[in-house]
Image (cartoon, coloured by chain):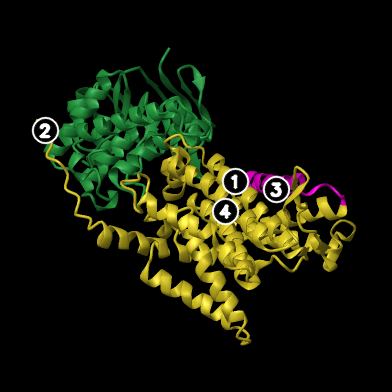
Chain colours: A yellow, B green
């Protein structure tokens, strides 16, 4: 597993992409609903964003050296929490949405405190089991979750400002699109700061050599639990948005295949970047998956997903992923980077 | 009161006694050498002090406080830092990145301050980076600062190991064979740095097979054989003791 950690950048030596390019790109993305009102295009983009947030969570956990096989369980937890609070208990939407991520984060904290003492393969197995446990509870706890019938979750209420209806979630998909952009932006900001701060360094230490890190004063479990909990919170929000976007949640929506999909997106995108990698991976794989599922050939989707992983891992190994390709392009072609030569020591 | 004290410390692996009833006192600022043939329990002793193993029997005190049974990170927090017998590195990082990960204990600001990028954190970080550069210069790693750690030669990897221990604010430094695979000059370079540390008040405990190095640096030597302490005293005396020579070379049969 150490294989994946060769491209962690602890120091930002230079701005890889000029700021103006990023600015223009962001404006272009924000203007998409103005150009197109196509339901298919917009819903594909919204789903891509949701999966990107989930993949970011997986990447954060992987940065501490732990391989979570149950990230979709947190999407289910967030989704069910929000659906139960709004539809079953009749609470208003926005507080329920905020609580949903916290519920999923709390479960991540409790599970993490128990399992992350040992970590490694035990953690992977327990998270795998967690995915199934959440699914079975959702199926069996009929009074709360309505079992296999699922819960119908309503769309977020319209936002009314000064007697004038500002945003209506039922009229078009554009509000959902901006909702998704907000979620991705907040998650991206938090994860980017984590990567840049001392936490990012400490995570790298716990992943790259746990024994050495422990003997230098790093309490491994603490940092593993921090990563797992933060990932749990934001994955929960992704699940809640997913639920309110599709307006239904059943036990079948989030299973092992969804966890594997999150994992594949993260690895194909590359784990060298906490934010860029998952976004690139989810854009590529969600759209590929959508296209393939329309072709009506059973099994083709899984087959091609597998092929993409094999190709990426073969040609961009060590966790480099597609973001590394982009980085290399900027460094070699645009910046024409020259070899680093250390100064002569002065004496 | 001794600075670091081991009282009747034993470590058994099944029926094998790796360390048996060892009593040891180390004063502040001392450079203690540990010698003994292979399998005599030297590394196990270091593992016991640093918390990697828990002693089967006995207790270890540091500064009057019991430390046996604590987690390794708690012991490191108190200032007992170790190096490893083999080259243990953060794989895939450069020298400066390894050093920055190891400078974990240099910071007085917490993770929130770092997350929010406050002024206090920036100052703190600058100070830590300054200390990293200082140590990199001191240990002759300046030309390799931005090179991958696993690409360094064996000797420089050992040096990096020592540098990573030194940046973790040691009060007691446990060095497990710091000069293996080094030539005489490199070994003497390490000896100089150990003496420098000792002058700054750091207690050093080192395992060493190279007698020239040991006689040069140690103020006191302890000899172990089959987990038992068989000699304790100034280096020249210990080296000439009959029991020590027997442990290393075997008895004469006449």
Distance (Cα) linking label 1 and label 4: 14 Å
Quickly name the residue at label 4: A184
Gap in Å between the C-alphas at discs 1 and 2? 46 Å
Q: What element carries label 2?
A: loop
Front-most of residues A185 and A228: A185
Q: Give the range drawn in magenta.
A: A89-114
Q: Which element carries disc 3, helix, strand or loop?
A: helix
Farthest bottom residue in view: A297
Residue at (64% x, 54% y) in the render: A179
Do callouts 1 and 4 mark residues in contact (Cβ within 8 Å)?
Answer: no
Disc sitting over residue A107 in the figure: 3
Quadrant assignment for the C terminus of chain A: top left
Q: Which residue is pictured at 63% across the width and 73% down the height? A: A40
Circle 2 chain = A
Q: Is residue B151 magenta?
A: no
Q: As drawn, is B115 to the left or to the right of B82?
A: right
Discs 1 and 3 lie in a common subunit: yes
Distance from the alpha carbon under mark 1 to that under mark 3: 11 Å
Q: Where is residue A67 in the image (x, y as percent from the top left)?
A: 54, 57
What residue would you read off at disc 2? Answer: A346
Kindly identify which chain the residue marked by label 1 belongs to: A
Identify the subunit bearing mark 4.
A
The answer to whether residue B32 is seen in the rendering is yes
For label 1, the residue is A230
């Amino acid at each position: 597993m150490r294989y994946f950690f060769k491209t962690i950048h602890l120091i930002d030596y230079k701005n890889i992409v000029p700021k103006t390019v990023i600015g223009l790109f962001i404006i272009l993305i924000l203007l998409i609903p103005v150009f197109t009102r196509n339901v298919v295009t917009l819903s594909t983009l919204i789903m891509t964003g949701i999966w990107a947030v989930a993949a970011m969570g997986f990447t954060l956990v992987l940065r501490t050296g732990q391989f979570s096989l149950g990230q979709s369980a947190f999407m289910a937890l967030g989704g069910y929490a929000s659906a139960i609070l709004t539809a079953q208990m009749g609470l208003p939407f926005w507080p329920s949405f905020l609580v949903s991520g916290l519920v999923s984060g709390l479960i991540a904290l409790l599970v993490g405190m128990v399992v992350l003492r040992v970590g490694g393969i035990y953690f992977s197995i327990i998270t795998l089991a967690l995915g199934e446990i959440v699914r079975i509870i959702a199926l069996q706890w009929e009074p709360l979750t309505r079992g296999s019938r699922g819960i119908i979750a309503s769309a977020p209420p319209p936002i009314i400002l000064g007697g004038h209806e500002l945003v209506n979630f039922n009229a078009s998909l554009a509000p959902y699109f901006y909702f998704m952009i907000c979620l991705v932006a907040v998650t991206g900001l938090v994860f980017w700061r984590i990567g840049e701060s001392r936490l990012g360094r400490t995570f790298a230490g716990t992943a790259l050599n746990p024994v050495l890190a422990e003997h230098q004063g790093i309490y491994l479990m603490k940092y593993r639990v921090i990563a797992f909990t933060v990932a749990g919170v934001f994955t929960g929000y992704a699940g809640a948005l997913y639920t309110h976007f599709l307006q239904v949640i059943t036990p079948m929506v989030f299973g092992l295949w969804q966890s594997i999909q999150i994992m594949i997106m993260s690895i194909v995108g590359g784990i060298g970047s906490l934010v860029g990698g998952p976004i690139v991976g989810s854009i590529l794989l969600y759209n590929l998956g959508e296209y393939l599922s329309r072709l009506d050939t059973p099994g083709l989707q899984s087959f091609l997903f597998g092929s993409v992983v094999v190709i990426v891992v073969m040609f961009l190994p060590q966790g480099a992923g597609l973001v590394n390709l982009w980085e290399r392009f900027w460094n070699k072609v645009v910046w024409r980077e020259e070899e680093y030569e250390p100064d002569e020591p002065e004496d | 009161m001794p600075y670091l004290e081991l009282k009747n410390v034993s470590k058994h692996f099944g029926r094998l006694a790796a360390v048996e009833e060892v009593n040891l006192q180390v004063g502040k600022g001392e450079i203690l050498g540990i010698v003994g043939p292979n399998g005599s329990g030297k590394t196990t002793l270091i593992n016991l002090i640093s918390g990697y193993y828990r002693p089967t029997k006995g207790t270890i005190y540091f500064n009057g406080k019991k430390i046996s049974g604590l987690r390794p990170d708690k012991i490191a927090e108190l200032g007992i830092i170790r190096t490893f017998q083999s080259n243990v590195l953060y794989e895939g990082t450069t020298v400066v990145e390894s050093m920055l990960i190891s400078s974990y204990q240099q910071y007085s600001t917490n993770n929130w301050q770092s997350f929010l990028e406050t002024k206090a954190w920036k100052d703190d970080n600058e100070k830590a980076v300054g200390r990293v550069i200082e140590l990199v210069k001191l240990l002759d790693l300046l030309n390799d600062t931005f090179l991958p750690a696993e690409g360094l030669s064996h000797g420089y990897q050992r040096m990096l190991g020592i540098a990573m221990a030194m940046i973790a604010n040691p009060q007691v430094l446990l060095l497990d064979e710091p000069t293996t695979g080094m030539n005489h000059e490199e070994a003497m370079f390490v000896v100089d740095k150990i003496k420098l540390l000792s002058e700054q008040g750091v207690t050093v405990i080192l395992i060493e097979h190279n007698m020239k190095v040991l006689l040069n640096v140690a103020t006191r030597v302890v000899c172990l054989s089959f987990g038992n302490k068989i000699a304790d005293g100034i280096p020249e005396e210990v080296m000439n003791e009959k029991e020590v020579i027997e442990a290393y070379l075997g008895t004469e049969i006449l």
